Image: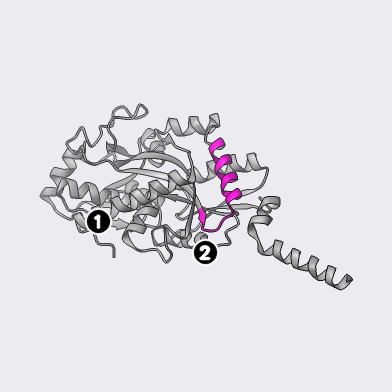
Amino acid sequence: MKRRTFMHGAAMVAALVASPELVAQTKFPAKAITFVVPFAPGGGGDTVARLLAKGLQDRLNNPVVVENRAGAGGNIGAASVMKSPPDGHTLLNISSTYAIQAALGRPSFDPLNDMQPIIVVAREPVILVVHPAASWQNAKDLALAARKSPGTISHGSAGPGSVAHMGMEELAYRMGVQLLHVPYKGSSAAFTDLLGQNVNLVMTTVTFAMPHIKAGKVRAIGIAGSQRLSTLPDVPTFAEQGWPEYQVFDWKAVAGPKGIPADVVVQLNRELNEVLKQRAVVDKFEAEGTTLVGGTPEQMMQLVRGDVARWKTLTQKAQIKIE
């Protein structure tokens, strides 16, 4: 009798250990949470991740660390998260680049079915910057120069298939010009070569470009969106300059591997929504012309699916090939 009781108890313990849902209900977070940024330090995604990590750490009273795992257009970092234990302790800070990579079919995992969406964080227009010494004063000047010298004007990006790369490819397609792509392992490296005048252009996010623009290190010649930003009133939109169909936005979001217990997803979504309401976070994003989003995991999945379809269509129309 006692033996049967003992075995029954042991079986219950084993079941608890094997059930992430039951464990999560009583022990989340049970250890430090890792935010993986799939690009090098210093980029826009890195800045957003560190801001979120600080807010989430304060709310959960639990360590939240940011880890950069760059390479392969964000696929190395993304793959490491999608293949991690689905317990909510390893999260991925994704951006539009994630959807682009999915559209190109480059990941070693299923970008939609292997991913658990948690929350969309923010959305911002891309912005095109040049060195202050560049002769182009606006996007029209650039288009004219590119038509005269096809394939000679270079643009640096955070890597093949990044939003910086594909955003520039779309602009070139709509302008009817050819540009030279120079890939790097992150936005910071591309910017360093722009400042050194080793590349001519960089398409990036407002979050990343703003400090450099304010410091006079780069000059913006065009921004996506239907209207100018109040924080950069002198920078014309591409729509104003003759390309109203050019509407490229970068978004930031948080995801994890498929299989995270539902209650953990709910908790993370709730806490991150609250972080996005904090005055310091709101002020930081608004100062950079970024729109905070928030919302549900389901809304995030709709965004990702829509973006994947969009970039697939563009890639086919523009006949863009990724080496």
Residue 126 is at least partly visible in this image = yes
For the image, the number of numbered tags is 2
User: Residue at the location (27% across, 51% down)?
Assistant: 155
Instruction: Give above or below for 315 relative to 145.
Output: below
At label 1, the amino acid type is Thr
- Give residue 204's mark: none
User: Residue at the location (42% across, 66% down)?
Assistant: 108
Between residue 232 and residue 302, name the one nearer to us: 302
SS for callout 1: helix
The residue under label 1 is: 315
- Bounds of the magenta span? 256-274
At label 2, the amino acid type is Lys
Q: From the top left corner, tell me how far across and down residue 160 is, in percent.
A: 33, 58
Q: From the top left corner, tell me how far across and down residue 233 is, in percent.
A: 31, 27
- Give residue 83's mark: 2
Instruction: Give above or below for 73 relative to 168.
Output: below
Between residue 241 and residue 220, name the one nearer to us: 241
The quarter of the image holding the C terminus is bottom left
Q: Which of the 4 quarters of the picture holds residue 204? A: top left
